[in-house]
Structures are given as structure tokens and as C-alpha cells.
């Protein structure tokens, strides 16, 4: 058995949705390891260091308590990237890898500029032997790029008259995250599996020892680098596939009078299928699913597997279709036009219990409604007005009252501090995020504030449809026939 290397200091490059929570859990479960999270975004680091842990840049249930317990003890947030790298035994690369918007592979391939920049910075600043861990979701064989950059900086200098021998060496591992936003802390504390890919046993065992502080040995899986990288893409592709599959059946249920929840319960009772990811909705979002499937499509085409590429491409296309279908349905049921009409949008995050809006279904649906001239009153418990503005590409424009605002055909939107503020004067309520509070709304109070005839479009099927109908609203819920 190879004796594992000792990890006393960890540096994580990237203080986002993966790096922050992951390092907080590692610091909490490994009090003997000093963990430093670094980022060039000074405002983000300031927020991580702020006295108000309720204002952390990432919202996850349980995260604030972890940060408050560990910060200043063995969890640190800093913009001093070079210093943290130089002091680290292990460096996690947890930077953004979005889909390329131009150049070769635009629309499908991952943009690896920040991975390359981080690898070069690690290569330049690391001291001694450093284990470099890919935490970002990456295309298969990205580790070759990282290893090539690090290898160019490796040094084996013998002792001189002025000092002892100096050695700079690296080991590269793949350790993809399998987190669901909204439950990330619980996922980190009790993972289904921890996957470590690599070809250097000592480095693999060093990382396994870190996780071994709280993860059972049988849940720590060891593979080669390429299997680890591909496993992450494949896991997300399979989960997204289930969402597109159930949404396709939801559309058929609406046409035939079936109920997608009853269908989902029936097929989910089959142990070969299981119950997870069988809830119909407005489609998948978040930072990973679409990006990873498109990257899988790109890889398949690169290796001339066109039939495989087309198969996975259809998962994304159906997801886009579902979002467009919901927007068109709203327009059609509101007498064929939403121009000048106020529509209350409840939820903008891509899922409940997170403030992440990356690739949120709400973005496409709101864009489509704005194109039709609607005035949207958007309420989300955790997403800021500034974030909504950035995602929609237009500033908020308060003042829509549902009584002719925007009859010139120009769409607009405003941020609403509460559900009641959003629905005042609205023709319709559109539920796009499954926040728990939206399942307990007072529909009598809501109906009293809305213009008649009033509609509820529940794209998550979480509201009390019977109560809404009793209050006088017409109701559409995803996957239910009329």
C-alpha cells in the first residue's frame, strides 16, 4: 500500500457555487487542514468575508453556519492568489467553464481559458510537490492540457553552494463535483460517491485521505483520469435526459387528459427506473446540464460519432421547446396577446433553495413574454433585481399596472418585493421556481388584487390548484389535461 502524501494546506481557485461550499465542508470536517479560497473578484471575496453571513455570494441551506464556524479558524477567503498557491500542498481548480460563444466549437465546446490561466498561475507559483485537482466540469482529456502546462514548469535542481536542492513537481487528479444546488451542503456531507481519477497512486490516496475524514471508504471510487472526466459529463447528461423525457410525456398528458404526476408515480415505482427526476416542469437549468450535454455533443462529433451526437442534442432541443411551449401557451390563453398586460412571475432562480440563475428556464420564458410586449412583475426570494437585469439584458421599469402599460408593444419588467406586490393588477400568475412558499399562497387575497379574467400558470405543479379555482382563477398546471 502506497503511503499517502500529507495534505496540510489546500488552496481553491474559484469562490463560486462549487468552490465556496466544497471548501467550507472540507474545512469543517478537516480541522487540521488550512483551507484558502481565492478569487480575483474582490467584491466576491469581500462578501465571503463579510460580517453578515446571510449576504454570502452563494445561497445554500446550511452554508452560512459552516462559514461562520470555520472562517478565521481554518477557512480563509482571499484575493492573494499567488501566496495561497505557493503555500498549498493541494490546489483545486474550481473556475468557470462556460460554453464557447465564438470560434471553433462555439455553442457546444467548453471555454477553457480560465482553466488554462489557473494552471499557468499554479505552475509559476507552486513550491515543492503540488497536487492539482480538477474540480470544474471539464471535457474529457482536459487533464492532458493541465499536465502539459505544469510539466513545462517542473524543476529538479540539485543542491548548490547557496542552498539545498529545489524540486517543483506536480500530480494531476480529476475530482468532479456531483452537487445539486439547493442541497449542496447535504450532498457534500453525505455523498453518494466521491470520484477520484488519476494515474499517480500517492496523489490519489492523499485526496482520498482528505475525504476519508467523513466519507465511508466504499464510497470513494478510484478511476483513471479520462473515466473520471467523462463520468461527470455522463451523469449530468443522464439526469437531464430524464427531465426532457418526463416533460415530453407531460405535453402528451395535457393533450390526452392524463396526469403526468400519476404517470410519474407509476413508472417511478419500478425499481429499475426509480423516482428521482420525474417531476415535470419548465425544463432544466443551472450551470451544468445544458453545458455538459453540449460538450458531450461536441466530443462525439469530434470523434465522428454523429448518431450519438444527434441523440444527446435532442435532449437539449426538447428542453428549449418546453420553455418556448410554456410562453406560447400563456400568450394563447390570454386571448392571443400579452401586450400591455401585467404578468406576475413567481420565481427566477433555476430551482428552489439557490440564488443561481444560470440557464434558468425563467430567462427564456421571460424573454419570450417580453418579446410579446408583456410587463412582467418578477418576484424571487433570493435573486436580486441586479441579477435579473443582467440575465434579461434590460433594466427594470416599474410602473406596470395591467391597465394598458406597454400597449405600444414594448415589453418591460419590474422587480417585486413580495407576491402580493407582483400580482397587483396582473392578468396572470406564472410560477417558474418551486419555492416552498409558493405552495402555500393565499389565493383569495391574490385573486382580489388581479384583473379579471385571471389565470394561474403553474409550470412546477406545486400550487393549490383547487384553492386558486375556488378563488375565481382559471388554472393551467404542467402535465394536466383540461
Image (cartoon, rainbow, N blue to C red):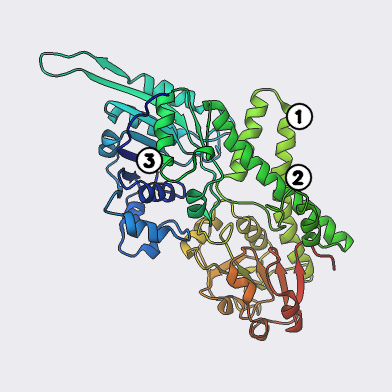
In the picture, the disc for residue 272 is: 2
Q: Residue furthest left?
A: 161
- Label 3 Cα crowd, 10 Å radius (few <14 / some 14-19 / many 20+): many
Q: Earlier in the sequence, mark 1 or mark 2?
A: 2
Which comes sooner in the sequence, label 1 or label 3? Answer: 3
Pick whichever of labels 3 and 2 is earlier in the sequence.
3
- Per the model, the C-alpha gap separating discs 3 and 2 is 40 Å
Question: Disc 1 and disc 2: Cα gap in Å?
Answer: 26 Å
Q: Is residue 29 above or below residue 197?
A: below
Left or right placement of residue 462 versus residue 158 in this view: right
Q: In the rendered view of the protein, which quadrant contains the C terminus?
A: bottom right
Depth-wise, is mark 1 or mark 2 nearer the camera? 2
**Residue pointed to by mark 1:** 307
* Number of numbered tags placed on the structure image: 3
Q: Which residue lies under the disc numbered 3?
A: 13
Separation of marks 1 and 3 at Cα, in angstroms: 37 Å
Q: Nearer the viewer, residue 55 or 221?
A: 221
Q: Nearer the viewer, mark 1 or mark 3?
A: 3
Residues 427 and 220: in front is 220
The quarter in which the N terminus is drawn is top left
The image shows residue 332, relative to residue 127, as above or below, that is below
Q: Position of residue 38 (x, y in %)?
A: 33, 44
Question: In the rendering, at what x and y percent does residue 346 appear?
Answer: 61, 68
Where 167 falls versus 390 (above or below)? above
| Number of residues whose C-alpha sits closer than 10 Å to that of mark 1, classed few (under 14), some (14–19) or many (20 or more) | few
The image's mark for residue 17 is: none
- The quadrant in which residue 334 appears is bottom right
State the SS at label 1.
helix
Which element is circle 2 on?
Answer: loop
- Residue 51 image position (x, y, % from top left): 30, 63
Amino acid at each position: 500500500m502506497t503511503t499517502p502524501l500529507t495534505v496540510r494546506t489546500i488552496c481553491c481557485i474559484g469562490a463560486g457555487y462549487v468552490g465556496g461550499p466544497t471548501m467550507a465542508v472540507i474545512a469543517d470536517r478537516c480541522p487540521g487542514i488550512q483551507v484558502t479560497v481565492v478569487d480575483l473578484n474582490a467584491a466576491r471575496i469581500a462578501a465571503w468575508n463579510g460580517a453578515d453571513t446571510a449576504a454570502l455570494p452563494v445561497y445554500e441551506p446550511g452554508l452560512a453556519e459552516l462559514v461562520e464556524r470555520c472562517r478565521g479558524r481554518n477557512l480563509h477567503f482571499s484575493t492573494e492568489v499567488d501566496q495561497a498557491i505557493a503555500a498549498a500542498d493541494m490546489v483545486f481548480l474550481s473556475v468557470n467553464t462556460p460554453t464557447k460563444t465564438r470560434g471553433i466549437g462555439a455553442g457546444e465546446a467548453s471555454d477553457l481559458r480560465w482553466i488554462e490561466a489557473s494552471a499557468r498561475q499554479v505552475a509559476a507559483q507552486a513550491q515543492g510537490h503540488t497536487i492539482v485537482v480538477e474540480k470544474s466540469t471539464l471535457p474529457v482529456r482536459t487533464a492532458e492540457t493541465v499536465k502539459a502546462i505544469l510539466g513545462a514548469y517542473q524543476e529538479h535542481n540539485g543542491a548548490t553552494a547557496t542552498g539545498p536542492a529545489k524540486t517543483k513537481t506536480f500530480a494531476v487528479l480529476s475530482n468532479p463535483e456531483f452537487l445539486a444546488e439547493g442541497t449542496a451542503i447535504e450532498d457534500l456531507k453525505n455523498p453518494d460517491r466521491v470520484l477520484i481519477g488519476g494515474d499517480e497512486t500517492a496523489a490519489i490516496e492523499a485526496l482520498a485521505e482528505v475525504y476519508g475524514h467523513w466519507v465511508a471508504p466504499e464510497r470513494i471510487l478510484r478511476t483513471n483520469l479520462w473515466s473520471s472526466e467523462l463520468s461527470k459529463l455522463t451523469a449530468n447528461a443522464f439526469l437531464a435526459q430524464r427531465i426532457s423525457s418526463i416533460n415530453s410525456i407531460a405535453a402528451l398528458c395535457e393533450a390526452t387528459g392524463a396526469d403526468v404526476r400519476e404517470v410519474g408515480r407509476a413508472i417511478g415505482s419500478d425499481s429499475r427506473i426509480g423516482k428521482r427526476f420525474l417531476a415535470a416542469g419548465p425544463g432544466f437549468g443551472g450551470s451544468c446540464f445544458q453545458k455538459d450535454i453540449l460538450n458531450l455533443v461536441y466530443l462525439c462529433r469530434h470523434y465522428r460519432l454523429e448518431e450519438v451526437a444527434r441523440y444527446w442534442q435532442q435532449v437539449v432541443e426538447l428542453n428549449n421547446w418546453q420553455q418556448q411551449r410554456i410562453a406560447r401557451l400563456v400568450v394563447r390563453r390570454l386571448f392571443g396577446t400579452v401586450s400591455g398586460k401585467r404578468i406576475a412571475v413567481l420565481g427566477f432562480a433555476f430551482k428552489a433553495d439557490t440564488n443561481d440563475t444560470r440557464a434558468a428556464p425563467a430567462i427564456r420564458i421571460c424573454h419570450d413574454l417580453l418579446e410579446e410586449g408583456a410587463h412582467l412583475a418578477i418576484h424571487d426570494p433570493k435573486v436580486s433585481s441586479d441579477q435579473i437585469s443582467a440575465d434579461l439584458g434590460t433594466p427594470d421599469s416599474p410602473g406596470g399596472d395591467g391597465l394598458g402599460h406597454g400597449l405600444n408593444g414594448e415589453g418591460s419588467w419590474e422587480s417585486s418585493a413580495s407576491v402580493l406586490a407582483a400580482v397587483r393588477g396582473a392578468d396572470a400568475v406564472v410560477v417558474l421556481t418551486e419555492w416552498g412558499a409558493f405552495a402555500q399562497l393565499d389565493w383569495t387575497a391574490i385573486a382580489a388584487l388581479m384583473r379579471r379574467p385571471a389565470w394561474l400558470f403553474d409550470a412546477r405543479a406545486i400550487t393549490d390548484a383547487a384553492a386558486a379555482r375556488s378563488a375565481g382563477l382559471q388554472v393551467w398546471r404542467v402535465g394536466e389535461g383540461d
